[in-house]
Image (cartoon, rainbow, N blue to C red):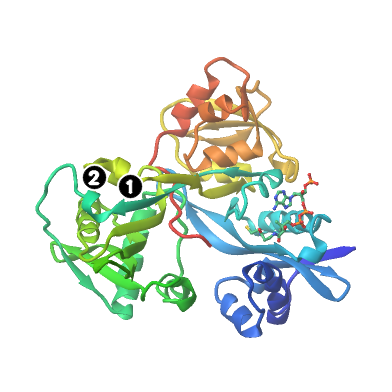
Amino acid sequence: MTVVRACASTEELAGALAAIGHYFGLESSLEDAERFAQWLEVERMHAAWDGDRIVGGAGAFSFQVSVPGGGSVQAGGVTVVGVLPTHRRQGVLTSLMKAQLADCRARGDAVACLWASEATIYGRFGYGLASRIGELTLARERARFAFPFEPQGTVRLVELDEAARTFPLLYEQLLAERPGMFARSMAWWETRTLFDDPARRRGAGPLNRALLSLGGEPAGYALYRVKQDWAEGSSNGEVSIVEVVTPTPAATRELWRWLLDFDWTARFAANLLPLDHPLFLLLAEPRRMRFRLNDGLWVRIIDLQAALAARSYTGEGHVVLEVEDAFLPENNGRWHVSAKGVERTTAGADLHLDVTGVGSVYLGGFGFTDLVRAARAEELRPGAAERADALFGRWAAPWCPEIF
Ligand SMILES: CC(C)(COP(=O)(O)OP(=O)(O)OC[C@H]1O[C@@H](n2cnc3c(N)ncnc32)[C@H](O)[C@@H]1OP(=O)(O)O)[C@@H](O)C(=O)NCCC(=O)NCCS
């Protein structure tokens, strides 16, 4: 019989991290746990104990996540979930998830979000697919823009301290417009985003930090690595673009042009791109990106009323959602949603759906009409899904630029 409880020390955190570490082929160390404790509060890591041995773990960062309309919500960023192979398929993850969801609720998180190692794991716990991401591979000779333009900006490669001063401001500017991004603490910037972890190089060179200025002001940044290679004397290298943040259209066009003009490489590779990436309209041959889609962020509504009240709506419409939630019964029932607020109601419902469906539409990555078409929601009144979509509005596609 396993027992789940929150960790009480860095030693316990190290034990709980060892479960997921096992699948990464890592040895667990107290040093790693101390590093991890910079971002994860020890008591937000749950451990599953079999006697005096930890056999599983699940953690949650304390995040603020941007939502449609420019606001943000308190969220649990679920991470480092693992159960040792000796204890798999005995319900250990289920116990960890139950404890974690209850803890998120007790802490006042409106939602929880995660990146799934496998898409089959988290739906049963109420997580809905909330965003899609894309990966591109673009040959250098196919990287022309559809319309010529004269670059106005300057790009400099900057040292760590300048990056640490300027990049977070640009990121925050974008976060105010893009749903699905989480606010990064300074410790996160210094020890994760800007930290050039040799383990992440995978044969490529160091992490480069490029800062774009427009009119003398910081306007965007790019993080990238170069992996050089040769074939018959010519470069068969790859520029691996790790993160590009450009809060304005002018900066997007400038910085991507600068990146895609990189000399002495055969191709560019980038991952975790938003579904509505401007390159589709910037490039002369968007098909040459070979844009591959994948599931991105998964969202679990923890406190339905608080979560829905935190995002914006468009128009004067209203909708009554009848929601089912097997794990958090507080969310069960009928909810009247409009731009004026979200409250419980006894009025007849327009749409019936599971809490996973609310997670899918929450950041705007999917609409109610998408849910209905996939039999993930049922229209109880004709036209209800379209009315709900009009109310929930159209926003930039949700984008979480980093796997956490
Ligand atoms: C995924 C993992 C945590 C599951 O833990 P577990 O303790 O075996 O899960 P449970 O026994 O609680 O399983 C609950 C249900 O989920 C299903 N399930 C669990 N893992 C699954 C997987 N990887 N794929 C599909 N279904 C899975 C089980 O079959 C079970 O279904 P049931 O309720 O219909 O019987 C564990 O296999 C693991 O550590 N995997 C490797 C690391 C990993 O992928 N971690 C997730 C990081 S995001």
Residue 100 vs residue 243, the one in the foreground = 243
Pointer 2 residue = 283
**Whether label 1 touches label 2, CB < 8 Å:** yes
Residue 230 seen in the figure: yes
Q: Height in image: 133 above or below 205?
A: above
Which residue in the rendered view is the most extreme toward the left?
150
The disc label shown at residue 236, or none: none
Q: Quadrant of ligand 1?
A: bottom right
Residue drawn at x 62%, y 69% as measured from the top left: 24
Q: Height in image: 88 above or below 338?
A: below
Q: How many marks?
A: 2
Amino acid at dot 1 = Met
Which numbered disc, 1 or 2, marks the residue closer to the eye?
1
Inter-mark Cα distance, 1 to 2: 9 Å
Q: Is residue 99 left or right of residue 167?
A: right
The secondary structure type at the circle numbered 2 is loop
Pointer 1 residue = 289
